[in-house]
């Protein structure tokens, strides 16, 4: 419920954002640019890290065929089977993502507080890890693309980091203008990207068809037998080929299952496999090539710079997809009570998914640029990559299995069998990435831990405040009886008192009556409530109850993918027989001054963190889209 929205342009006349009807082919094309950017640019660094990274293996036929077979079956099992067939089924009215899964379970676990608390922590952890992924993906993708110019001349090495910072800086500065226009060319560019990747790979396979032996999974067993523990550790590099799976699920609401599946099976998977096998063919032909990026080595003579340019554009698209995903994730976190209010700008009049969050944007930019300046090399940065991806996939598996049991009522043996099958891959990749923690993986853990602590602190702090106000709240019938008995002075006009709880009389009203000894002739007790679904139908948005004596209780419901708009709600009240003129209405909002001296069990440092976050949250007036000159703030001190 805590969100703030500033429209970049006038909202639609009916106040509702919607996704227009788009042909299936267009949706599948758009999915290529938005969803598969991260997965599609992984060939830039995956095999290079497998063979030339900090835990790389020797370039020989056993290792090349083994790594390729691992890549092949990881793409088939994790992406083609786990995500596109199973996980995409777990949609919350078309929306996907960690918080979407959590929202689906909220009502069913209402009376199982311990179970709900564990899943809440898991979902928040998964979301925090995705933030870490959102920081690393733009840095490693753009850096690995621009490093391709090193293949042409060693003199270019000194320009790689500055050029990377320039590209990333420009990308983040462009965010405030929205991505609707440039989004139209994302799909065609990615079609060209996958087509060229596949063609380059195919040409190399023709020169060395032996590489096709990797289709046989027996080479996986041979590889582990030859490399032992080192082979297990190298899984931390193999997992780079499936980074971006969570984006596939989180962005489901923008496109739907069918377009995502079509794009994957018809374009993305063939292009990726051909390129990976082509890189493997190059390594078999040139086993003594040294520390070289096999992706750019596939480029015919004279086309390297063109490939670098295309790769850079593709990585910008991949980065844009992750940045947009972080915006959506933040909006969901705010609506579900895990983050304080932030300014959210809608950059499209009709498409609700097109948003921009300035605070998140600049923090992401600072983190990405810092990573590039500190690591300076994609191979070193790859060591920090992977842990967030594998941990998030494991968490998604865990919550998904809860959906199968609690919502779909699967038998226990079926859910456990699926859990064990998914964890065979997820768990193996996660364990392998533990070995990379000291090489740079600690950065992801540090970022995720900071965000997780902030999320849980905000949630717990708001719960403490809610309990404080609940104890101060007066039962509605008691208040109305006293009102009839004492009959305070009533002034003309309408007053709206915002309340977190849709029951009882809010503290702000009691505070107002105590000091002014008067009430407006019409009083609205207004609560904005978060729903379990991503959106709420217009006709189900508002509930109105006449309490008598000029008092009305209004409940406005918003999904976790929506932002509140109080003026629109007041317009809907007119259709229910209660006409409200917003410019003659006074809105009473509470404003707390928080003190860390209360008796709550929250530790002192977390109290100070919560107070800091609360003080810097976006103001409630902008959040509700109320005309500032109609707002009256009633302050009070609260010890937490």
Image (cartoon, grey):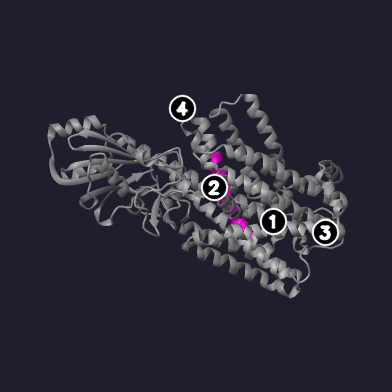
In which quadrant will I find the C terminus?
A: top left
Residue 403 locus on image (x, y percent) = 56, 32
- Whichever of labels 2 and 3 marks the residue nearer the N terminus, that label is 2
Which residue position is annotated with label 1?
382
Q: Residue at x 55, y 66 (%)?
A: 169
Point out the stretch of residues depicted in magenta: 120-139
Marks 1 and 4 sit apart, C-alpha to C-alpha, by 43 Å
Tell me the element at label 4: loop
Q: Which of the numbered marks, if any, corresponds to residue 255?
A: 2
Q: Is residue 436 visible?
A: no
Q: Which of the numbered marks, if any, corresponds to residue 111?
A: 4
Q: Residues within 10 Å of mark 3 (few under 14, many from 20)?
A: many
- Whichever of labels 2 and 4 marks the residue nearer the N terminus, that label is 4
Find residue 219 and report its image quarter.
Answer: top right
The tally of labels here is 4
Q: Is residue 178 visible?
A: yes
Q: Nearer the viewer, mark 1 or mark 2?
A: 2
- The residue lying toward the viewer, choosing from 163 and 272, is 272
Residue 83 lies left or right of residue 567; in this view the side is: right
Q: Nearer the viewer, mark 3 or mark 1?
A: 3
Which residue position is annotated with label 3?
282
Marks 2 and 4 sit apart, C-alpha to C-alpha, by 35 Å
């Amino acid at each position: 419920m805590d969100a703030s929205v500033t429209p970049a342009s006038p909202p639609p006349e009916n106040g509702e954002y919607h996704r227009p009807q788009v042909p299936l082919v267009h949706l599948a094309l758009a999915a290529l640019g938005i969803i598969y950017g991260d997965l599609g640019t992984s060939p830039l660094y995956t095999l290079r890290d497998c063979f030339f990274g900090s835990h790389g293996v020797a370039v020989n036929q056993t290792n090349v065929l083994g790594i390729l077979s691992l890549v092949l079956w990881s793409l088939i099992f994790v992406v083609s089977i786990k995500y596109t067939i199973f996980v995409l089924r777990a949609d919350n009215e078309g929306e996907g993502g960690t918080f979407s899964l959590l929202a689906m379970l909220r009502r069913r676990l209402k009376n199982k507080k311990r179970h709900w608390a564990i899943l809440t922590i898991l979902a928040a952890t998964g979301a925090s890890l995705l933030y870490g992924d959102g920081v690393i993906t733009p840095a490693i993708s753009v850096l690995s693309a621009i490093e391709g110019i090193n293949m042409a001349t060693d003199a270019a090495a000194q320009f790689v980091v500055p050029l990377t910072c320039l590209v990333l800086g420009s990308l983040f500065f462009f965010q405030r203008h929205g991505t609707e226009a440039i989004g139209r060319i994302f799909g065609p560019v990615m079609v060209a990207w996958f087509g060229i990747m596949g063609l380059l790979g195919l040409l190399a396979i023709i020169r060395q068809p032996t590489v096709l032996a990797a289709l046989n999974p027996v080479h996986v067993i041979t590889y582990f037998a030859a490399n032992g523990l080192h082979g297990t550790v190298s899984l931390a590099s193999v997992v780079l080929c499936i980074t971006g799976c969570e984006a596939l699920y989180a962005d489901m609401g923008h496109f739907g299952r069918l377009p995502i599946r079509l794009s994957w099976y018809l374009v993305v998977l063939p292009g990726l496999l051909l390129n990976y096998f082509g890189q493997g063919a190059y390594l078999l032909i040139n086993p003594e090539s040294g520390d070289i990026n096999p992706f750019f080595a596939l480029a015919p003579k004279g086309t390297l710079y063109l490939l670098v340019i295309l790769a850079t554009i593709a990585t910008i698209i991949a980065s844009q997809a992750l940045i947009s995903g972080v915006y959506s994730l933040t909006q969901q976190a705010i609506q579900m009570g895990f983050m304080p209010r932030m300014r959210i700008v809608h950059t499209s009049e009709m498409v609700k998914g097109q948003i921009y969050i300035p605070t998140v944007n600049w923090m992401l930019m600072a983190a990405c640029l810092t990573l590039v300046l500190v690591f300076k090399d994609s191979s070193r940065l790859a060591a920090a990559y992977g842990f967030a991806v594998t941990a998030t996939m494991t968490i998604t598996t865990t919550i998904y299995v809860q959906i199968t049991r609690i919502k779909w009522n699967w038998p226990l043996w079926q859910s456990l069998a699926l859990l064990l099958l998914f964890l065979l891959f997820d768990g193996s990749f996660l364990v392998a990435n533990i070995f990379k923690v000291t090489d740079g993986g600690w950065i992801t853990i540090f970022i995720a831990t900071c965000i997780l602590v902030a999320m849980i602190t905000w949630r717990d702090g708001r719960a403490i405040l809610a309990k404080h106000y609940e104890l101060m709240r007066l039962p509605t019938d008691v208040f109305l009886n006293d009102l009839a008995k004492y009959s305070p002075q009533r002034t003309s006009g309408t007053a709206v008192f915002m309340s977190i709880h849709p029951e009882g009389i809010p503290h702000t009203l009691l505070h107002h009556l105590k000091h002014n000894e008067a009430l407006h002739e019409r009083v609205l007790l207004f609560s904005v409530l978060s729903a379990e679904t991503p959106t709420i139908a217009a006709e189900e948005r508002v509930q109105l109850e006449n309490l008598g004596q000029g008092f009305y209780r209004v409940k406005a419901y918003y999904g976790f993918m929506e932002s509140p708009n109080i003026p629109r709600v007041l317009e809907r009240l007119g259709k229910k027989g209660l006409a409200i003129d917003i410019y003659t209405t006074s809105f009473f909002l509470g404003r707390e001054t928080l003190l860390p001296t209360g008796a709550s069990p929250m530790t002192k440092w977390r109290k100070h963190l919560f107070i800091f976050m609360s003080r810097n949250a976006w103001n409630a007036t902008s959040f509700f889209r109320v005309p500032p000159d109609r707002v009256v703030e009633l302050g009070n001190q609260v010890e937490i």
